[in-house]
């Protein structure tokens, strides 16, 4: 049995597809805040969130497949939560069955498997009941496949057959087996036979007991072991162990198969439960979110309305300003403007939304359309590190070299103040050559920079594939945190920050401040 709630044709795994630059993405996009919101204090959901978000889907169809399942989860939350609770209950209860007992012998393995399957049968019946009652409500392809599989494979005949087998495997009437004898009279080819024990009434049981007492030697080839014959009992136990060994292994395999199904159900539903947790937090702040429109990877589109940094919003009680981007057929977006005007925030917003879209989630925006990327990379400026063995420029170039070795066409690269650690002329030239080379390889680039020489150089080329955004500065010097289309400016208005922070000190020192 397969779940197929994350992929159409395969299972989802916790160690699946996490990119080599995962730590850079987590640090630069501040993803830990997102992960904690998804997990809501659950360590298992935290692991699911990290894998699902970082292991971006590379094809449009799988994204749409998950979006359909998520839509059902948002509409029928209680049913989905009941399914998830069932899977959690089964996996946790199973781990406590004979957890202290050695399973080295076929007898102990058989008894544990019987107990586990007894637990599973009740859970499978609950699962079948949920499918019968609610499957018609769900519209997504994924849930239709899931409930269809449950209805087909867990029919009444199957469940009853499992119960009957478990009853027989208790061997209340003894063990019936056949065995071949080798030349040295040792047994081989042990075969366990079905032994149907007739259920007797109380009166019939008494009659059978009296008959066993009064009956003399029967006509069959039988023998009885003296109650004091320990060696005889050990020999019989050895025969019984040989007889049930294959059955014990087969039953354990069946138990593991059903357990793996419930573990997969918990894992894959865990992703959608995390989405529900996140939705509750966004609803509490009245932050907007939407189902994004993934486009083919050769579309080179990025169009959004009201996009905002969800991680920033989750970290502050204040409302966060959203922005619009009209990136139709744009492979380069250059973001310039006033200091502390929201440039880096917008960059993180886009990277976060792209990751969330490519794992099948909703995104923090009113509307969002973007082409699917084959990889998402970040190159953000780093703070001074006393342990650095080389200069900051060397460190930046080293990180860029690692990106260039891994990046592929149709990927997205987010650059935040890259190569600003050297002077503007050198930094602009380094960045210009790298950007041009990556654009030739069909890499989509978003670049936040204060280097006017770099930004203005691209702007003067009048590239049809380039979009230029500028952080808005109001006449009084305040920031609106909105990014508008506009040509780069030579100044980043650092004096505004000076006035705001040092006005009192400047006046005491009689420094003219306008």
Image (tube, rainbow, N blue to C red):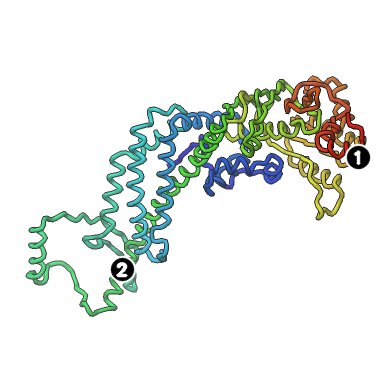
Quarter that holds the C terminus = top right
Horizontal and vertical percent for residue 230? 27, 78
Q: Secondary structure at mark 2?
A: helix
Q: CA distance from mark 2 to mark 1?
A: 100 Å
Residue sitting at x 44%, y 47%: 88
What is the total number of numbered labels drawn onto the structure image?
2
Q: Is residue 461 visible?
A: yes
Horizontal and vertical percent for residue 483? 74, 25
Horizontal and vertical percent for residue 70? 51, 32
Q: Is residue 137 above or below residue 382?
A: above
- The answer to the question of whether label 2 and label 1 lie on touching residues, with beta carbons closer than 8 A, is no
Occupied quadrant, residue 496? top right
Q: Residues within 10 Å of mark 2 (few under 14, many from 20)?
A: some
Quarter that holds the N terminus = top left
Residue sitting at x 56%, y 46%: 46
Does residue 247 appear to the left or right of 214 in the view shown?
A: right
Q: Secondary structure at mark 1?
A: loop
Horizontal and vertical percent for residue 26? 67, 43
Q: Residues within 10 Å of mark 1 (few under 14, many from 20)?
A: few
Residue toward you, 466 or 471: 471
The circle drawn on residue 509 is: 1
Residue toward you, 36 or 443: 36
Residue sitting at x 71%, y 31%: 346
* Residue topped by disc 2: 239
Q: Is residue 315 above or below residue 410?
A: below
Q: Given this view, does label 2 or label 1 mark the residue nearer the observer? A: 1
Does residue 204 appear to the left or right of 400 in the view shown?
A: left
Does residue 272 appear to the left or right of 301 in the view shown?
A: left
Q: Is residue 334 visible?
A: no
Indicate which disc, 2 or 1, sits on the residue closer to the N terminus.
2
Q: Is residue 284 above or below residue 460?
A: below
């Amino acid at each position: 049995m397969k779940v197929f709630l994350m992929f159409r044709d395969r299972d989802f795994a916790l160690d699946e597809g996490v990119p080599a630059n995962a730590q850079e993405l987590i640090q630069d996009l501040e993803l830990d805040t997102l992960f904690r919101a998804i997990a809501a204090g659950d360590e298992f959901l935290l692991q699911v969130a990290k894998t699902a978000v970082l292991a971006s889907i590379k094809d449009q169809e799988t994204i749409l497949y998950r979006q359909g399942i998520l839509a059902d989860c948002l509409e029928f939350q209680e049913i989905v939560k009941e399914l998830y609770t069932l899977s959690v209950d089964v996996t946790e209860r199973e781990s406590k069955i004979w957890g202290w007992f050695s399973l080295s012998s076929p007898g102990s393995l058989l008894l544990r498997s019987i107990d586990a399957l007894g637990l599973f049968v009740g859970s499978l019946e609950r699962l079948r009941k949920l499918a019968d009652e609610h499957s018609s409500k769900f519209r997504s392809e994924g849930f239709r496949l899931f409930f269809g599989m449950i209805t087909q494979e867990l029919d009444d005949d199957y469940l009853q057959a499992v119960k009957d087998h478990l009853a027989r495997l208790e061997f209340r009437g003894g063990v019936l087996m056949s065995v071949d004898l080798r030349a040295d009279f040792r047994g081989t080819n042990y075969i366990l036979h079905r032994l149907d024990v007739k259920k007797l009434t109380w009166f019939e049981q008494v009659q059978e007991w009296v008959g066993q007492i009064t009956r003399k030697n029967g006509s069959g080839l039988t023998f009885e072991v003296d109650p004091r014959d320990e060696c005889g009992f050990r020999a019989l136990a050895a025969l019984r162990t040989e007889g049930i060994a294959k059955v014990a292994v087969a039953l354990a395999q069946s138990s593991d198969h059903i357990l793996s199904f419930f573990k997969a159900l918990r894992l894959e539903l865990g992703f959608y439960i995390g989405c529900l947790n996140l939705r509750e937090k966004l609803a509490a702040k009245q932050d907007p979110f939407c189902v994004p429109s993934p486009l083919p990877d050769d579309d080179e589109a990025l169009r959004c309305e009201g996009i905002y940094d969800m991680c920033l919003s989750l970290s502050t009680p204040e409302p966060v300003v959203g922005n619009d981007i009209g990136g139709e057929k744009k492979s380069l977006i250059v973001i310039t403007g006033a200091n502390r005007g929201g440039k880096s925030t917008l960059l993180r917003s886009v990277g976060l939304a792209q990751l969330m879209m490519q794992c099948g989630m909703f995104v923090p925006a009113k509307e969002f359309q973007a082409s699917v990327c084959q990889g998402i990379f970040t190159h953000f400026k780093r703070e001074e590190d006393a342990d650095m063995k080389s200069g900051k420029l060397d460190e930046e170039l080293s990180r860029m070299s690692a990106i260039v070795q891994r990046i592929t066409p149709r990927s997205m690269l987010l650059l935040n103040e890259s190569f600003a650690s050297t002077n503007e002329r050198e930094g602009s030239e380094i960045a210009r050559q790298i950007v041009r080379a990556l654009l030739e390889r069909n890499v989509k680039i978003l670049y936040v920079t204060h280097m006017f020489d770099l930004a203005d150089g691209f702007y003067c080329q009048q590239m049809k594939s380039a979009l230029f955004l500028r952080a808005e500065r109001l006449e009084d010097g305040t920031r609106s945190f909105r990014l508008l289309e506009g040509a780069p400016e030579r100044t980043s208005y650092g004096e505004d920050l000076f006035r705001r922070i040092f006005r009192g000190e400047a006046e005491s020192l009689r420094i003219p401040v306008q």
